[in-house]
Image (spheres, helix red, strand yellow):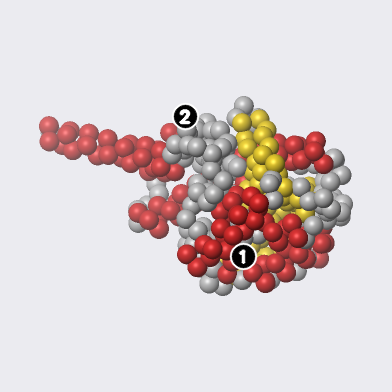
């Protein structure tokens, strides 16, 4: 009985130890005191490293304005705003998990600017210069997105067209934000390789990296997150937001993505009841669809922006009028 009791205690401690480790590794900021970084915080994919760095360098050479807002829960959030003197609108960018705008959008900054748009690259909470102890995978960040939209309205006016663009976790952030009552000058969303919910993404990572069933470990980590970080992994999802969304959405995803599988975007696409457009890129792994097939992605983005810049939101969705690819 003593041996059995010891084994039970060890299993119990091991179980909760793994759950705590999962929470700390996935959710907690690695270093809340990290110095501000303008360069890539994630190593660029080797075949595209030079292109990403060159694009990030171009952006910094334009001397974007460092801007700050305060989140709904009192965090200082930082962004970099590059105004186009002949702006048709503004692209509001949200980077991915433990990354930065300079890394994730280095390849596309100049393309957006030359299309005639201003660029606001927001640094998500618990990343870079923005405050925050915990990464919330879009559940709290969706309200940060709404705050950044309000900031742009104070800067550019209530009729200035705004498009939301997110990559990976940033994609889930902007998709979840569509469930909020966004102002009418938010014209559309470009969502690249987003997941549906933290819960589903963690299930995928546990299966891919650890080859273990997600439950009951994920239930324990979810409980810890609720108590410590103030959110649960199933508190909200893109699928829930898309039930009420009325904004047109351009979905993009690489078909070879295993980190955030292509099926997540297919689920989001099917759940979307507004005008929608799907670009799938064969051979593209996570977050590099634009780099793998730049002409295809540029054509889709250009078409999408041209169609919806200045167009009033429709009170009723009509997905049949917007073709998919």
- With 145 as the anchor, is 254 left or right in this view? left
Image spot of residue 48 (x, y percent): 53, 65
The image's mark for residue 229 is none
Image spot of residue 316 (x, y percent): 83, 53
The image's mark for residue 290 is 1
- With 146 as the anchor, is 103 left or right in this view? left
Quadrant for the C terminus in the image = bottom right
The quarter of the displayed image where residue 21 is located? top left
In front of the other: 304 or 318: 304
- With 92 as the anchor, is 141 left or right in this view? left
In front of the other: 47 or 208: 47
Work out whether mark 2 precedes mark 1 in sequence or the reverse, and give the earlier one: 2
- With 15 as the anchor, is 179 left or right in this view? right
Image spot of residue 294 (x, y percent): 64, 69
C-alpha span from label 2 to label 1? 39 Å
39 lies above or below 9:
below
Quadrant for the N terminus in the image = top left
Which residue extends farthest left? 2
């Amino acid at each position: 009985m003593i041996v059995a009791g010891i084994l039970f205690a060890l299993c119990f401690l091991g179980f909760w130890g793994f759950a705590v480790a999962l929470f700390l590794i996935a959710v907690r900021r690695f270093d809340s005191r990290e110095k501000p970084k303008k360069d890539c915080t994630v190593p660029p994919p080797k075949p595209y490293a030079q292109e990403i760095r060159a694009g990030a360098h171009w952006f910094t050479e334009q001397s974007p304005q460092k801007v700050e807002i305060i989140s709904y829960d009192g965090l200082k959030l930082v962004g970099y705003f590059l105004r186009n003197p002949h702006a048709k609108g503004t692209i509001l960018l949200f980077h991915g998990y433990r990354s930065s705008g300079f890394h994730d959008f280095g390849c596309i900054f100049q393309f957006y600017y030359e299309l005639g748009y201003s660029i606001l690259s927001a640094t998500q909470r618990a990343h870079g210069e923005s405050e925050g102890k915990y990464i919330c995978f879009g559940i709290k960040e969706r309200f940060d997105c709404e705050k950044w939209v309000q900031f742009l309205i104070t800067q550019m006016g209530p009729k200035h067209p705004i498009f939301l663009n997110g990559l990976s976790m940033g994609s889930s952030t902007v998709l979840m934000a569509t469930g909020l009552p966004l102002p009418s000058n938010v014209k559309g969303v470009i969502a690249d390789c987003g997941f549906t919910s933290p819960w589903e993404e963690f299930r995928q990572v546990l299966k891919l990296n650890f080859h273990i069933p997600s439950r009951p470990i994920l239930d324990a980590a979810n409980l810890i997150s609720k108590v410590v970080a103030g959110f649960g992994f199933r508190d909200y999802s893109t699928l829930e937001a898309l039930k009420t969304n009325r904004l047109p959405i351009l979905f993009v995803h690489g078909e070879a993505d295993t980190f955030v599988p292509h099926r997540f975007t297919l689920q989001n696409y099917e759940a979307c009841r507004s005008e929608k457009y799907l670009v799938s890129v064969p051979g593209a792994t996570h977050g590099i669809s634009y780099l793998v097939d730049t002409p295809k992605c540029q054509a889709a983005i250009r078409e999408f922006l041209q169609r919806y810049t200045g167009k009033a939101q429709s009170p009723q969705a009509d997905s049949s009028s917007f073709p998919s690819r």
